[in-house]
Image (cartoon, rainbow, N blue to C red):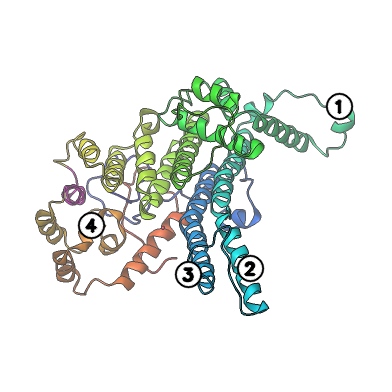
């Protein structure tokens, strides 16, 4: 179900099962094939997680941090600016009853009043001309692309290091003098790889994707947000190199790539970054990184399909837990495409359907959520799935009855799920939910218990778990005991 741990492994030969973890987690590997090239504190924290999962998760966390900054710092800065303007206005009004204007004559009783008035006028002028908010928005916009550049470098580095055939395919000249500086072939290979990646990142994003398509034999630009991605990247270039002033290249590239830009924009027009632009860019960058990493991972390392599925499950759940509904919707849609369903069990597929339906519903796309749920027959499914359907359909009376029938623990559900599942976001607002919960578990629902449950679930996302034998069905109950949006 939404946020149920399912790892893409076959559950063949199993009938009923109970689970162990609500949130999916990439699982511990006996031996890492290549160590993730990340900051020391990240490597030390989780050395056993799949390298490519660490790369994409670190990237998405950085994007999320930028978004949080836009939600916290920008409003505070704008409020501070308004308050300061109001304070200086009151100081000015103490000396004059009307708006100061050229030609207005003011008589001051003493030099001190004159100094205070002049200082207030000068401060108000500075505040009215202050561009701190738009400058910070521009900086955060550009930082999103800095994070993406670092991500794509780490992504390619891990792919090359894990695939020797790709590493051998690098063709670069090196002098004998330079070669003799290396202690061994591996050091020389890594240096060549670094130069290859640096050269790759100097190209435009359009050219980068074109090169990746040719190298890996995949269509990587056929998604709805591609024109948006191109426009944002072109605008980033203008902001970085031309103070946002439009040039012919911006218009030419955007027109060629079918970007929707204001038809009145001409060379010389200055572009800025609105809050909507910033939020849209961060959402698009999240989706692009998520799709690119998992697409290349599945293509280059097909034997690691189970790890790909675990990574998708964990990141989709994290987006739901953080209430990033539109981002979760993007992740869910992509996870249901044919390449991402390779070697996916039927149970895991249904989990993804539920997850994606949750994201759609909370993104105010009820019709899309209903279409997803209607795409399969749920008749013979676990009661836990049926409860999810009733909750998503807002048939709460029947959901209450099914809660009682499931009791203290279902095939996948248990007590912690009612506290932490994003699925129950609206259901938890009803009085009959609380009374039924207390009837089942013999204790009242409490926020403290919710925090403990959320900690358990968050911990399962961040901690590697042991590999399950292939003949065992996936389990989905959260671990006992306390754990660490």
Label placed on residue 97: 3
Mark in the foreground, 3 or 1: 3
Q: Earlier in the sequence, mark 3 or mark 2?
A: 3
Main secondary structure of the magenta stretch:
helix
Q: Are marks 2 and 1 in contact (CB under 8 Å)?
A: no
Residue at x-position 51% and y-position 67%: 89
Q: Nearer the viewer, residue 425 or 67?
A: 67
Identify the mark nearer the N-term, 2 or 4.
2
Q: Earlier in the sequence, mark 2 or mark 1?
A: 2
Residue on which disc 1 sits: 175
Residue 115 visible to the viewer: yes
Please name the residue that numbered disc 4 is placed on: 426
Residue 235 placement: quadrant: top right
Q: Are marks 3 and 1 in contact (CB under 8 Å)?
A: no
Q: Please give the range of residues in magenta.
A: 381-393
| 387 within the magenta span | yes
- 18 on left or right of 140: left
Point out residue 239 in the picture as x, y percentages from the top left corner. Answer: 60, 39
Report, in whole angstroms, how far the alpha carbon at label 3 lies from the one at label 2.
16 Å
What's the residue at 51%, 31% (across, down)? 231
Q: Secondary structure at mark 4?
A: loop
Q: Nearer the viewer, residue 373 or 288?
A: 288
Whether 196 is drawn above or below 82: the answer is: above
Q: Are marks 2 and 4 in contact (CB under 8 Å)?
A: no
* Residue 284 point in image, percent of width and height: 45, 39
């Amino acid at each position: 179900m939404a946020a149920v741990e399912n790892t893409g492994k076959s559950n063949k030969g199993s009938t009923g099962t109970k689970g162990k973890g609500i949130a999916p987690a990439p699982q511990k590997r006996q031996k890492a094939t290549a160590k993730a090239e990340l900051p020391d504190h990240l490597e030390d924290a989780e050395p056993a997680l799949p390298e490519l999962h660490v790369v994409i998760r670190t990237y998405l966390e950085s994007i999320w941090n930028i978004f949080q900054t836009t939600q916290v710092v920008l409003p505070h800065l704008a409020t501070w600016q308004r308050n300061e303007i109001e304070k200086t206005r009151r100081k000015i009004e103490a000396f004059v009853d009307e708006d100061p204007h050229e030609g207005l004559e003011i008589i001051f009783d003493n030099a001190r009043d004159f100094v205070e008035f002049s200082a207030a006028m000068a401060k108000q002028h500075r505040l009215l001309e202050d561009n701190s908010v738009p400058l910070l928005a521009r900086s955060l916009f550009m930082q999103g692309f800095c994070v993406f550049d670092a991500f794509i470098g780490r992504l390619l580095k891990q792919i090359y290091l894990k695939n020797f055939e790709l590493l051998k395919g690098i063709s670069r000249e090196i002098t004998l003098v330079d070669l003799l500086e290396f202690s061994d072939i591996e050091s020389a290979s890594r240096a060549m790889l670094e130069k290859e990646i640096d050269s790759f990142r100097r190209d435009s994003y359009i050219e980068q994707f074109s090169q990746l398509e040719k190298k890996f034999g995949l269509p990587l630009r056929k998604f709805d947000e591609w024109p948006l991605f191109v426009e944002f990247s072109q605008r980033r270039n203008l902001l970085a190199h031309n103070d946002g002033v439009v040039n012919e290249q911006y218009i030419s590239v955007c027109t060629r790539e079918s970007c929707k830009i204001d038809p009145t924009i001409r060379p010389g027009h200055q572009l800025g970054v609105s809050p909507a632009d910033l939020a849209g860019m961060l959402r698009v960058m999240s989706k692009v990184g998520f799709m690119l990493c998992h697409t290349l991972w599945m293509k280059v390392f097909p034997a690691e399909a189970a790890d790909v599925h675990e990574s998708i499950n964990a990141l989709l759940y994290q987006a739901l837990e953080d209430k990033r509904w539109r981002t979760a919707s993007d992740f869910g849609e992509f996870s249901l495409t044919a390449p991402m369903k390779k070697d996916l069990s039927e149970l895991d597929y249904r989990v993804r359907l539920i997850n994606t339906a949750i994201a759609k519903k909370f993104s105010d796309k009820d019709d899309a959520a209903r279409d997803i749920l209607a795409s399969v027959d749920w008749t013979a499914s676990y009661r836990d799935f049926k409860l999810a359907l009733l909750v998503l359909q807002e048939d709460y009376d029947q959901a209450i009855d099914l809660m009682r029938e499931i009791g203290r623990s279902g095939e996948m559900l248990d007590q912690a799920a009612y506290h932490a599942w994003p699925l129950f976001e609206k259901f938890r607002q009803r009085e009959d939910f609380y009374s039924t919960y207390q009837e089942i578990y013999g204790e009242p629902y409490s926020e403290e218990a919710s925090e403990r449950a959320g900690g358990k679930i968050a911990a399962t996302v961040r901690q590697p778990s042991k590999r399950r034998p292939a003949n065992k069905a996936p389990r989905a109950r959260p671990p006992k005991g306390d754990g660490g949006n």
